[in-house]
Image (cartoon, rainbow, N blue to C red):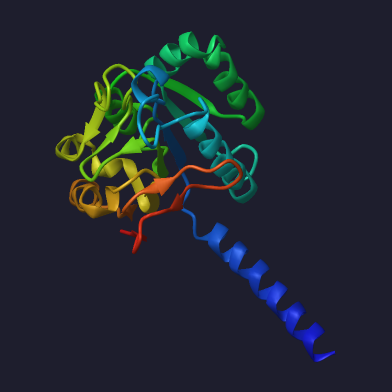
Amino acid sequence: MAKRLLLIIAIVVLVCAQRTSAANVPQGEWIVVVGGVSMHQWEQYKTQPHDHWWANFVHAARIRTEELRAQLGPNAPITWLVYKPGYLERSKQDGVDLIANINSVRDAYNLHLVYFDNGSQVINYLNNGQPRTELKIAGFEYFGHSNRACFMFDYSNVVDSSSKAWLHETDLTRIDRRAFAKGAFVKSWGCHTGEEMSRYWHAATGTRMWGALGKTQFMDDELPILTSEGGKWVN
């Protein structure tokens, strides 16, 4: 009887915590940035090749979007910014129309989908993609390749182990900090960004970005996990 009572109390506490969490989310737009995946021609001879699956980042973003829809509701404004050149190139490799696959995620989850080609377009959307006096940014999350200093939108997609499109920590000062709602949630799910880039993000925007110390691994059925010894999420 006592065990059953404790279980009921635990469930009530969990439900209340979830409701409190949802209530504390600021009103506004949630932005999910999805970087491009690597190409087999550059990765095939590496000990640990990247991105065997084209949907490495798209799938993780979809899992997170399911959580957001459950938390925020079916009509809350959620925007995906997707690095299109990476998926056009991967489409040629895989022989599949990956843009159509990404569009199907938009339709299934009632998303505003915007394709971009470079970091400047990402900054422009943050600043001007919506009237920021009316619709602030309530959340920003990044799914893609990264290092301690930048989001790499096309790592190993055009050049082996290099990036031709990125958003560097020194570019962050171009973001209008007034675009963010008070208490906005920001997280990078890529590798290493908690080691340096998070500090630049906070200095530039006034919001704190959760990032990883060490590497992350994108999974099949859950959100990315930390894989480095001593790795942790910091902001």
Relative height, residue 62 to residue 24 (above, below): above
Q: Position of residue 115 (x, y in %)?
A: 42, 19
Q: Position of residue 92 (x, y in %)?
A: 47, 8
Relative height, residue 118 to residue 5 (above, below): above
Residue at 37% over, 31% down: 131
Quarter of the picture holding the N terminus:
bottom right
Residue at 35% over, 60% down: 231
Q: Nearer the viewer, residue 103 or 124?
A: 103
Quarter of the picture holding the C terminus:
bottom left
**Residue farthest right in this picture:** 1
The answer to whether residue 138 of the structure is visible from this angle is no
Q: Position of residue 179 (x, y in %)?
A: 31, 40
Position of 228 with respect to 59 (left or right) is left
Number of dots carrying numbers: 0
Residue at 49% over, 24% down: 113
Relative height, residue 55 to residue 146 (above, below): above
Position of 219 with respect to 110 (left or right) is left
Q: Quadrant of residue 111?
A: top right
Residue at 28% over, 21% down: 118
Q: Nearer the viewer, residue 134 or 63?
A: 63
Q: Nearer the viewer, residue 77 or 81?
A: 81
Q: Position of residue 132 (x, y in %)?
A: 35, 36
Position of 3 with respect to 51 (left or right) is right
Relative height, residue 43 to residue 192 (above, below): above
The answer to whether residue 104 of the structure is visible from this angle is yes
Q: Nearer the viewer, residue 26 or 190?
A: 190
